[in-house]
Structures are given as structure tokens and as C-alpha cells.
Image (cartoon, rainbow, N blue to C red):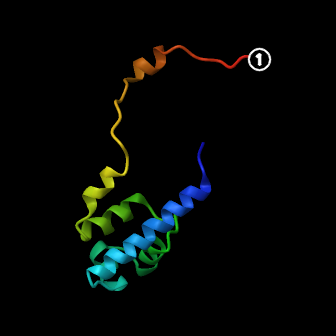
Amino acid sequence: MFSVIRGKEALDEFGRKLRAQRLHRNLTQAHLAKLAGLSIPTLVQLEKGKGGTSLANVAKVLGVMGLADQLGQMLPEVEAKSLKAYLEAPVLRART
């Protein structure tokens, strides 16, 4: 089951870590935003853990800081089935 609370916590943590990385690199919000081609308010929203920005903006910021490879590591590897395999799989129904 999905949890909005956990999603919000994850965004908050991402924002906190993003800010820490920016400060560790001694970058101002204005400078990082300019390097990433974003507005300052967009970067501020990312650092506050607001979910209203695009994944492309996240990738731009991570790329400027040399962390873009981390984006692909967010999800575990799984074996992808073909569409045919999904369509041929038996349909399980709950008892009534």
C-alpha cells in the first residue's frame, strides 16, 4: 500500500540532503540555480521537499553537483517481463 506520509517524509529528507550537499560545496542557492538553469524559487522548493517540480529539474541539480548517477540507484533492479508474459499470466480473482 502507498503512503502519502512516507512520500512526504522522503521528499523532506531529499530536500534536507540536497541543501546539505549544496552547502558542503559552498554554493549559494542563486549560484546553483543558475548553473542548473533553474529559478531560485524552484531550487528553494526542492530544498524544502516540495513535490511540485519535475524530475528533470532534480536531474539538472544533481548533475551540476556531480550526483546524477545517484538518480538511477534510487530503484532496485528487477527482471522486466515482456508485455506478452503479463497478458498471458493467469488472472487471480478473490473469492466472493
Label 1's element?
loop
Residue denoted by label 1: 96
Determine whether, in the image, residue 12 is placed left or right of residue 73: right
Determine whether, in the image, residue 93 is placed left or right of residue 14: right
Residue at (35% x, 34% y) in the render = 78
Could you say where residue 38 lies in the image, as x and y percent from the top left? 36, 74
Between 23 and 62, the one lying in front of the other is 23
Determine whether, in the image, residue 5 is placed left or right of residue 82: right
Residue at the far left in the pictured view:
66
Could you say where residue 55 lies in the image, as x and y percent from the top left? 40, 58
Could you say where residue 62 lies in the image, as x and y percent from the top left? 30, 66
- Residue 75 versus residue 34 in the image, above or below: above
Residue at (36% x, 51% y) in the render = 74
Image quarter for residue 96? top right
Between 95 and 61, the one lying in front of the other is 95
Q: Amino acid at mark 1?
A: Thr
Quadrant location, the N terminus: top right
Mark 1, residues whose alpha carbon is within 10 Å: few (<14), some, or many (≥20)?
A: few
Q: Total number of numbered labels?
A: 1
Residue at (26% x, 64% y) in the render = 67
Residue at (45% x, 21% y) in the render = 86
Image quarter for residue 30? bottom left
- Residue 22 versus residue 60 in the image, above or below: below
